[in-house]
Amino acid sequence: MQKPNGNPHAHSQSTQLPALYLEPSVSTTTVVTTTTTTTTYAPIPLPALPAITATPPKDGKEYPLYNVRLPPSASEFNLVFPGGKKAFFRDQNDGNEVEGSGSNNALGSSFGGEEIVSGKGWRMLPREDSQSNSSHSPPHAIPVVGLNEALEGYSTKKRERAHEFEFESIAIEDTPARKKARAPPSPLPSPQGSPPPDSKGGWRQASNPDPQAQIVQVPTPPTPFEPDLSVTTLLALPSLLNHFTSLPESLQSHVLLMLLRHSPLPVLRTLHSVLHPTLARDFLTLLPPELVSHILGFFTLSSLGRACRVCKAWRGRIEGDKVLWRDLLVRTSLWFGGETEANFVKMLMKKRRNAIDSDDTLPLAHPYKILFKSRYLTYTRWINNPSPKHISFHAHGHSVVTCLLFSQNRIISASDDHSIHVYSPTTGRLLLSLDGHEGGVWALAAHGNLLVSGSTDRTVRIWDLQEGRCLHVFGGHTSTVRCLAIVKPEWITHPETGEREKWPKRTVVVTGSRDHTLRVWRLPKRGEREFDSRLPASPSVHTSQVNPPLPPSSPDISDPPDPSLNPYHLHLLSGHTHAVRALAARGRTLVSGSYDCTVRVWDIPTGRLVHTLNGHTQKVYSVVLDSRDGTWGSEGWGYGNTGGYRSGRGTDGRAASGSMDGTVRLWSITTGECLHVLSGHTSLVGLLGLSPSFLVSAAADSTLRVWDARPSSNSGDLLRGVMTGHTGAITCFQHDEWKVVSGSDGTLKVWDLRDLNFSNSSPFSSNLVGAVPVVRDLLTGITGVWQVAFEGRWCVSASNRNDVTVLDVWDFSKTEMGPDEEWVGEPPGGTYDHEDSEVEDSDAEGVAGNEGRDEDGDIELISVHEERDDDDDD
C-alpha cells in the first residue's frame, strides 16, 4: 500500500492489524432498465492484540505457542452477519497466505504488497488508486470509498417507493413543512452497541432547533452490515486477552477448560493440530542411546517398520542402532557366530566405501540391520512365497553344464562345450561368452571381476569379466584341472603368542588335477602383466610390458610348459598317488581329497604336507573345511575368533570328507585324528556342504542327510535329519541354515531345515532325528538337473529338457511391493567373491588378538569414506 509520500515500501509489516473485509454492497434501482451499483469497502482494521510480556519470550519454553503459526482455518475465515452479509477475517500478523481459489480466497487477494478484497465481478483497488486525483483516473475507473463515506451515503440516499413512512413521536403541530435535515455520518459498529439496523426506521430532526419543531421518522437505507457478536468479540479481543493474562494460571486453566467443554469437534481438531506438534517430545532423540535401544527392543518387527516411517530422524536412529539389530539377530536365532557376521560387515562396509553421502539421502543403515533383513527374508520368503518370479532360457546348446556360479548379480556357467557364459538373472540375456579353452571347463571360481577356470585342456585361465577377455593362461598341469579354489588373505592368530598375521600374504589360486598334483598360483591383480605360458619365454618376463595377443588356438601340449618360467607360480604340491578330485582351502590350510582314498592337509605358504588322513577304503570325492572355530596350519596357526584356545577334540579346525565307501569322516586338522565316522548312506557320497549349524551330505542312494556341525557336538550320533524324496542319485545341491535345494533325475526340490535349526539351538535336543519336509518342487518332469546355485533372493539351476540345456531362474523377492533391494545374499561358506574384500589393513592392525574389535566383541566398522591401500603387502 502506498503512503502519501509515494514510497510503496513504507508500510511496515509490523503495523498490519487484523482486519475485516466486507463484501461489496449492491443496490439495484429499477426504472426502465436495471442499474446495479457496486460499492467496495476498505478493510476495517481491528485493534491490535497485546503482547504476552514486555519482551516476547526468546526460548519459547514458558510460552511455547506464542510464535506458532496459526492454522489457516483459525487465521483466515468467513463471517456471515445477520441479513446474509458476508465478510472475511484475516490475521495480518500471522503471515499466512491465501492459497487456491476456495471460499477464503473469494474475498481476499494480494496486490502490490497490500491485501486487496475481490470477488466475482468486483475488486478493491489499492489505496493509492482510490486517493489519486480524479483527473488522473481513467474514465472507466471504479469508485472506491471508505466505510464511513459508504455509511453516510447510504443514510442520505432516498429510495423511490410508492409510499413514505412518517411517524410522529410527539404531538405534531400544524406548522408549515420543513425541509428534512441531512443526517450525520453513521459511526462504525462498536462493542458498546449501536441500535441494530433492523430496528424501526431511523429518527431524524429538522435543522430548526426550535423545541416545538416537528420530529418525523424517515426510512433509513440499510448499512453495509449489521454487527453481531462476531464483530463485538473481535473488537473486544484485546481487552479480553489483557484480562486473561492477568489471571492466575490455575484460573486460566479453568477458563480454557470451560471453553473447551463447550467447543464442538471441529474446533477441538483445530486446537489439536496446533498443540500436538508444539508440545510433542521426541524421546528417540532426547533419551540416551542405551535407553533407546532397550525401549526399541520391545517393539515388534512391524512396529519397528512403522516407526521408521515416522520421520527421517527416527529412521536414521532406528536403522543405525547396532545394539538393537544385534539383539534381534540373537533373539530370532539368526545370529550364527564365528566369522559369518564379521565377514558380512566387512563386505558391506567396503562396498559402501565409495558411496557418496549427501544431505538429501537417508543415513545408511547399520550392517547388522541389513544382515537381519537379509536373513529374515531368506528365512521367510523362500518357504512362504507361493509364486516367485520364474524365467527359463536356453544355454550351451545340447552340452552339459559342468559349473554354475551366482556372483555379483551375474549367472556364470561353464560347459563341456569349452565355453563360459555370463547371463543376466533378471532378463536371461547373454552378457558375455568367454571362449578360449580347448577342452571342457570343469572348475570355476570368481573373485570380483576376475574369473578363474580350469579345463580338460590342462590350463588355468584368468578372465576379465568387465572386458570379456582372457588375461592369463597358466600351464603346468599334465592332465585335466578338476578342481580349484581362490584363497584370500585373512587375519589369523597364533595360539601361543597371540600375534595376528595375514595369511596368505597375497590372494592365491589352488588347483587340483588328475595328474595327482596340486599347484599354488598367485592371483594377478588387475593391471598386472599378462602372461601366457604357451608362448615362448622372453627376457622381459618380469617387466611391465604386456604380452602380444593370445593365439587363437593352443600349440601342441605334448611338451607341457615349464611352470618355473611363470612369475605367478608359487608351489607344486606332490604326494597323492591318484587324481585329485576335491579340495578346500582357507587361511594357511589346504585340504585335498583324492582317488587314492586319502585326505591330505597342506600348509599353503610353504607348500609342505602336514597330515595324511587315512581311513576311507575307497575314492574320496568331496571335502569341506570348517574354519569357523579355528583352522590350524603346519605351525598351529588359527583364526582370530579362537584367541589363544589350544587344540582339543571337537573344538579345533575340522575337515569332512565323503567317499565312495558310503561314509563321511570328520578329521582334526591339528592332530590328523579321525573324530567321527558318519554312517548311513549306502552308496557314493559325492557331495558335501557345510553351514554354521549343519553338515549336509548327498549320495548316489537318492538321499541327503543332515548332521550336526556345531563344534561342541561330541555325541556319537550327529544325525539330525534325512531327506528322502528323490528317485535317483543326487547330482547337485546347496544349503544354508534354513533350506536345502537339491537336484536329481527329474526333479528339483526345496527342503525346510527351520525346525532342525530350532532344535539345534535347544540344549535338550541332542539326539533328535526326523524326516526333513519338502517345501516345493521347483522343477518336475525333466530329464536331469546338472547344477544348482542360490544366493539371497536368487536361485538358478541348469537342467536337461528334451536334449536341450535350459537355465531356470527364480526371484523370491518378487511380490506385489516389488523386489527388496536390501536383500543381500550370503555365499556358501561365508566367503565373498568381491575383489576388494581382501584384508588389506596394515600389519599394525593385527598385532593384538583383540585389535579391530570394539567393547561388545563386534568387529569395528570401517568408515565409508576411509581411504585404504588397495595393493597387497609383499
Image (cartoon, rainbow, N blue to C red):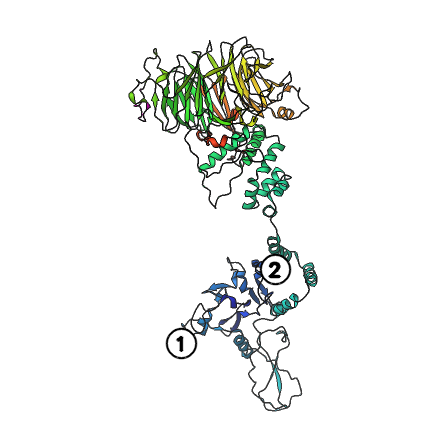
Q: Nearer the viewer, residue 825 or 394?
A: 825
Q: Nearer the viewer, residue 63 or 273?
A: 63
Give me the residue at 40% from left, 12% from top: 479
x and y percentages locating residue 328 in the rendered image: 61, 35
x and y percentages locating residue 679 in the rendered image: 60, 13
Query: On the image, which quarter does residue 677 sit in?
Result: top right
Is residue 342 in the magenta section? no
Tag 2, which secondary structure? loop
x and y percentages locating residue 232 in the rendered image: 62, 70
Which region of the structure is painted magenta? 542-551
Vertical order, 833 against 42 (above or below) = above
* Residue at mark 1: 135
Number of dots carrying numbers: 2
Q: Amino acid at mark 1?
A: Ser
Judged left or right of residue 711, residue 436 is: left
Magenta stretch: helix, strand or loop mostly: loop
Q: Amino acid at mark 2?
A: Tyr
Is residue 544 in the magenta section? yes
* Residue 394 at least partly seen: no
* Residue at mark 2: 63
Q: Quadrant of the C terminus?
A: top left
